[in-house]
Each structure stands twice: as structure tokens, then as C-alpha cells.
Amino acid sequence: MTEIIILGICPIPFVDCYIYSDGGTNVYFLSEILLALMSFRFYFIMRTWLNQGEYSDTFSVKLCKSYGVESGMKFSLKCLYQTKTEGTVTLLFVWTIIIFSYLVRIFEVPAYRNLASPSFDSYFNSVWFTVITLTTTGYGDLYP
């Protein structure tokens, strides 16, 4: 049921309304909120990639059943991590940067427009902010 709800979320073209936050200082569009919720669809891409991978074939499923282990997305991710550590961690890090940069840009642009600062108008600045935050460097040049 959750999957049907996530796949059913989609902005309606040419129909939009304002959503006020912080006492009316920040104004979001309904379409921006729906686009942020649509980012949960990346989960389906990852699940499909892991469930159709090399650790989900018939032999792997049979082997997992014989040892009492559930063959699924979690099992495939653990196997990929054990066999291809650098590639798996890098891919997950890049996907995390892409998704969170997109979400940061959606939710921080209205606040920075009220301050007349173009900090998050560029997607590159959102990527930079996400990388600096995830690596716990925190230069302080961009902050939410």
C-alpha cells in the first residue's frame, strides 16, 4: 500500500498552491513538496537493482534457503559490500549526495530568497553543502 501511495504522488501541471511556514515568512509551492516526496522513488530503483543482481539468482535463493537466510535486498547489499566494498560505498555515497542535494535545494531556496542571498539557487552549492556536511568537514560557508 505504501508503494502505491509513493508512486501515486505527482504534481498536477498548472495547479499549484502556496504553503506558508515560519509564520508566513517562507513560502513553498505544493509542487515542490510533492517533488520532494517523489524522491522516495529512488528506493524502487535501488531495490530493483539489488533484487535483479547477481546475488538474487536461483542458485543464491536456494543456497539462502538451505542456510535459513532470507534472500532479499538486504542480503544482496551485504554481499555487494563484502565483494565490492569500494564500488558499493562509492555508489551509495554518490546517490546520497544526489538525493540530499536535491532535497536541500528544494527546502532551503525559499528561506534564502527571503534573506536576499543566492546561496542555494545553484544546484552545485547544494551539492557542495551536502558533501561538506556528510564528510563532517563543515567549513561554514553554507549553512541551512
Image: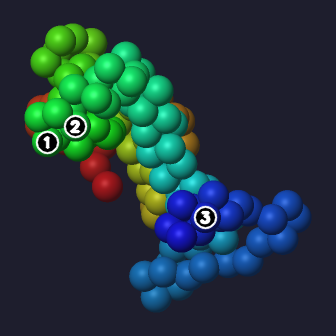
Q: Is residue 136 above or below residue 82?
A: below
- The span from disc 2 to disc 1 (Cα, nearest Å) is 5 Å
Colouring: rainbow
- Circle 1 crowding by C-alpha within 10 Å: few under 14, some 14–19, many from 20: few
Question: x%, y% of residue 95?
Answer: 39, 31
Mark in front: 2 vs 3:
2
Q: Is residue 69 above or below residue 63?
A: below
- The span from disc 1 to disc 3 (Cα, nearest Å) is 30 Å
- Residue kind at label 3, given as amino acid type: Ile
- Residue kind at label 1, given as amino acid type: Gly
Quick one: 139 or 34, which is closer to the camera?
A: 34
Q: Secondary structure at mark 1?
A: loop
Quick one: 134 or 108, which is closer to the camera?
A: 134
Q: Which residue is mark 3?
A: 4
Q: Which residue is mark 1?
A: 68
Residue at the image point whose x is 45% and y is 45% from the top: 43
- Circle 2 crowding by C-alpha within 10 Å: few under 14, some 14–19, many from 20: few
Question: x%, y% of residue 142?
Answer: 30, 43
Say if mark 2 contacts mark 1, CB within 8 Å.
yes
Quarter residue 12 falls in: bottom right
- Residue kind at label 2, given as amino acid type: Lys
Tag 3 or tag 2, which sits nearer the N-term? 3
> In the image, which disc is placed on residue 65?
2
Quick one: 6 or 100, which is closer to the camera?
A: 6
- Circle 3 crowding by C-alpha within 10 Å: few under 14, some 14–19, many from 20: few
Say if mark 1 contacts mark 3, CB within 8 Å.
no
Q: Secondary structure at mark 3?
A: helix
Residue at the image point whose x is 54% and y is 48% from the top: 41
Residue at the image point whose x is 39% and y is 44% from the top: 100
Residue at the image point whose x is 28% and y is 29% from the top: 62
